[in-house]
Image: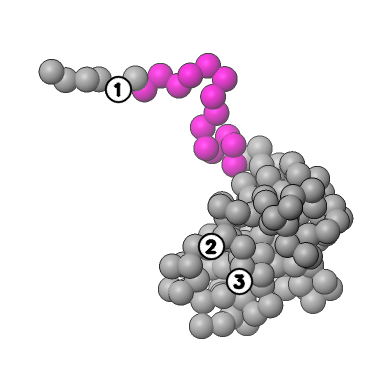
């Protein structure tokens, strides 16, 4: 007996390309040099990559590590699980992942919480490395 999968998209559903485009349309994404300047000016760089990616590729000095699965709880000023730094809605946050896809979705989620200055690093950590900016092993 063979079961055939239903490949018809449910009404109202969106594909990931559409979801990503919608998220990015709300962001003022930063290239690596601009993100570095934002960090120097007080923006918080937030590394949402899993530990295996950080171990394999390195990190950005001064970046706060908050894995993606807990990001909203750590940055919602209303949350009992928030980080001490996440105490206001105008906090400048620049989220990054390895290549800049997941970070776009994460930054849009932070905007949904009210963090209107949240954005992401276009091209992710890989773009930071290509730009020759400082990294940690």
Q: Is residue 17 magenta?
A: yes
Q: Residue at x 73, y 62 (%)?
A: 83
Label total for image: 3
Query: Which residue, given by chain and number where applicable, does mark 3 sit on?
Result: 128
> Which numbered mark, 3 or 1, is in the foreground of this view?
1
Q: Residue at x 71, y 42 (%)?
A: 25
Q: Secondary structure at mark 1?
A: loop
Q: Position of residue 69 (x, y in %)?
A: 56, 52
Q: Position of residue 6 (x, y in %)?
A: 34, 19
- For residue 65, say whether it is visible: yes
Q: Quadrant of residue 60?
A: bottom right
- For residue 76, say whether it is visible: no
Could you say which is closer to the camera, residue 130 or residue 137?
A: 137
Among the two numbered marks 3 and 1 on one chain, the one whose residue lies closer to the N terminus: 1
Query: Which residue, given by chain and number where applicable, does mark 2 sit on?
Result: 49
117 vs 82, left or right, is right
34 vs 8, left or right, is right
133 vs 7, left or right, is right
The disc label shown at residue 5, or none: 1
Q: Tell me which segment is drawn in magenta.
A: 7-20
Q: Main secondary structure of the magenta part?
A: loop
Q: Position of residue 70 (x, y in %)?
A: 60, 54
Q: Position of residue 59 (x, y in %)?
A: 57, 75
> Which numbered mark, 2 or 3, is in the foreground of this view?
2
Q: Quadrant of residue 34?
A: bottom right
């Amino acid at each position: 007996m063979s079961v055939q999968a239903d490949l018809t998209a449910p009404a109202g559903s969106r594909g990931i390309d559409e979801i990503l485009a919608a998220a990015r349309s709300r962001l003022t994404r930063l290239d690596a040099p601009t993100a570095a300047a934002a960090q120097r000016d007080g923006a918080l760089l937030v590394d949402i990559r899993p530990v295996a990616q950080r171990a394999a590729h390195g990190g950005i000095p001064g970046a706060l590590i908050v894995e993606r699965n807990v990001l909203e709880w750590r940055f919602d000023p209303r949350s009992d699980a928030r980080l001490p730094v996440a105490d206001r809605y105008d906090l400048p946050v620049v989220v990054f992942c390895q290549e800049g896809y997941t970070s776009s979705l994460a930054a849009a989620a932070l905007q949904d919480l009210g963090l209107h200055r949240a954005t992401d690093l276009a091209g992710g950590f890989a773009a930071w490395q290509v730009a020759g900016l400082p990294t940690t092993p």
